[in-house]
Amino acid sequence: MRSLRRACGSLVAVLVLLGLALGLTSGLPGGPARAATADEPTAARVLFPRGAPAPDVIFVGVPGLRWSDIQGAIPTPALWLLARESSLGALAVRTVEPTSCPVDGWLTLNSGARAVGPRPDRGCGAVPAPRGTGTRATIPGWAELVAPNGEHSYDPVWGTLARARPGAVAPPPAERCAVGPGAAVALADGTGAVHATYAADFADLPRTACSELLLVDAGPLPAGPTRLPALRQVDELIGQIRAEIPDSALIVAGIADSDPDEPHLTAIMVEAGADSLRGLRRGWLRSDSTRRTGTVTITDLTPTLIGDAIPPDLDGHRLQYRPRIESTPSSVRELEQRDIAARVMSDIFVWFFAVLIAGQLLLYLGVWLARRSGADRRSCARVLRGVGLTFGAVPAAAVLANLLPWRASDHPAVALWVLIAAGAGAIAATAAGGPWRRAPYGAATAVAVVTAGTFGLDVMFGSRLQMNNPFGLSPLIAGRFYGFGNIAFAVFAVCALVAAAGGAAALIRRGRPEPAAVVVLVVGAIAALVDGWPRFGADFGGVIALVPGVALLAAGVAGIRVTVGRALAVGALAVALAAAIAVLDWRRGPGSRSHLGSFVQDVVDGEGLDVIGRKLDANLGLLVDAPIIVAAAVPLTVLAVLTLLRPTALGLDALARAQAADPVLRPLMLACLTTALIGFAVNDSGVIVPAVALLAAGPLLVAIWANLWVRERA
């Protein structure tokens, strides 16, 4: 077997050398390589002058490069050899817009913060070609190029990669080189002056330049029939760079999407050099931005290229290394499947929640019509309980589906739908048939415990199952890669409240209301800790939203009257608890903080109010930019408020009687609604929190009410 591998490796190497000897290199579209002429054989062409100082690091940006492009020695022998010797990763290139254009990627590399360029006719504009060469190049129209960033909250500082930030001392331009227009944009300062030696082509580089960093814009890979020729040209360029400058560290990254209508996770490879990036040996790439082996973000590239003098306010972190024992084909297949899973989740997301909402409403309507037609109450209650438990189990089933390799299926979307449906049915059947089934809260509590436990344990062990999940995290959105996002928090919080209410109801039936309140407080404290702790949920706003809900449920169970003073005290406690967690995170230092500690640093720097203002703008902006979310969230919220306060106005007389007879149901409904509404107010893009909270809690509350209804005396 080993001899076969060696033979295959030798064959690949021979193919590469033959390709170089035949001089297949030609000009890259929009990139630095020149087309060979009849008077200039490509075999004699040299990219880098002999005797010139080798750069410590070479960065080649290839917008649109994906792992599906690199599948073996044909047609990309040089890229495949590089993959065999490099640290590999999937690169999340989302900046501001749903898809990232090449100029967005280069501007993000420039500043280390998410950035965006102009969108003429809602498409990608061309990267502007610099004026001048050498150390006097400038980017024309720089002010117009960066103007769209004034509308967003990421506040990029131009010139960060060039170390030309205000107040910084930039090294001599001769130590850095930019080849191609995108590379020049990445090394420009806040005025558009390129702080590097610029050349449109390798042949124009001075012999004495590039001792520190060489940035190369290899041009975007287009969609359609011209993609393969462009990919081969990139492959030939990488082969020549590795052959002529073997001691330099080499980073090849797909820094943007190639299709403005379809986002992807792109490819990134890092090969350590003799003196640079030696910690990034053959393996997986990782960063503290994602806390995920094999997945990094575009904002991690700038700190990696800067090296030791990293500004403390950058969003990204330096790339790290993790060992890789898988073969190169297996590793590449795994990274390609991550892209497949991300795109499947993006495609089905809206449809998934539409089916979840419409399916429940239609089934509930059917039961209501059947009851109006004279159907037996017990039969109707049984159907309602089954519907509630099944739909209530969907979030847990969706997360647990990631235990199985559905993304490797020939039809991954179909496989995912089947797994979620089967998992929800299995969880619901187990809950309905357990020894707790005779208790009104028993089956719903079992589903809630499974759901809250699944989400909680997952974030405690790195949020692996939540990635590429309709109730979890999306690397294409790239809002966060660990902990609880808004959707996951909404599910976890209301299921924790239902689980606490189920335990309290069991004690109240035994005549023990005081221990019941203690159970609620203990379960709520554990949930708040899991939600807010930086190494787990890392959710500042979630703690502020969850604590009042827990307090309302505990007060209702214990029969304690809620007053304005007590409500304010609980609110202050929630803020203090969240602040304490954030301060503890801040004390860990800049390299180890989550976004909680970073917010504390913003407050220390006097920028706390600006950050809060940007979050409020983002929340309000979503109400305008995403009307479909508003169209779903507002009616659901109004329906929840009416169901809680005026159930008779909706014809739910049986629910009104259940609220009056059961001491837990109404406090539970009030706690879920309060947590959902506060979650909307204190979280980025929090408008989705009430909608998802009601989708998660609603079915379980229906199952509880169905059990109470069937036990009601005629």
Image (cartoon, rainbow, N blue to C red):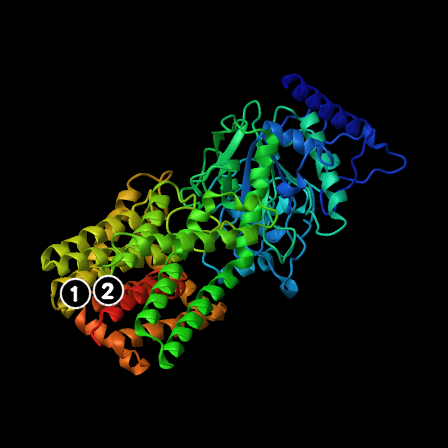
Q: Quadrant of residue 179?
A: top right
539 sits to left or right of 147? left
Q: Quadrant of the N terminus?
A: top right
Q: Nearer the viewer, residue 556 or 152?
A: 556
Q: Residue 233, percent across and down?
A: 74, 39
The amino acid on which the numbered mark 1 sits, given as a three-letter code, is Gly
| C-alpha span from label 1 to label 2 | 8 Å
Q: What's the residue type where badge 2 is placed?
A: Leu
Residue 415 visible: yes
Q: Quadrant of the C terminus?
A: bottom left
Q: Position of residue 65 (x, y in %)?
A: 64, 44
Residue at (35% x, 58% y) in the render: 490
Query: In this rendering, would 461 be left or right of 321?
Result: left
Circle 2 sits on which residue? Answer: 668
User: Does the residue at mark 1 contact the one at mark 2 (Cβ under 8 Å)?
Assistant: yes
> Mark 1 or mark 2, which has the lower sequence index?
1
Binning the other alpha carbons within 10 Å of mark 2 as few (below 14), some (14 to 19) or many (20 upward) gives: many
What residue did someone put label 1 on? 556
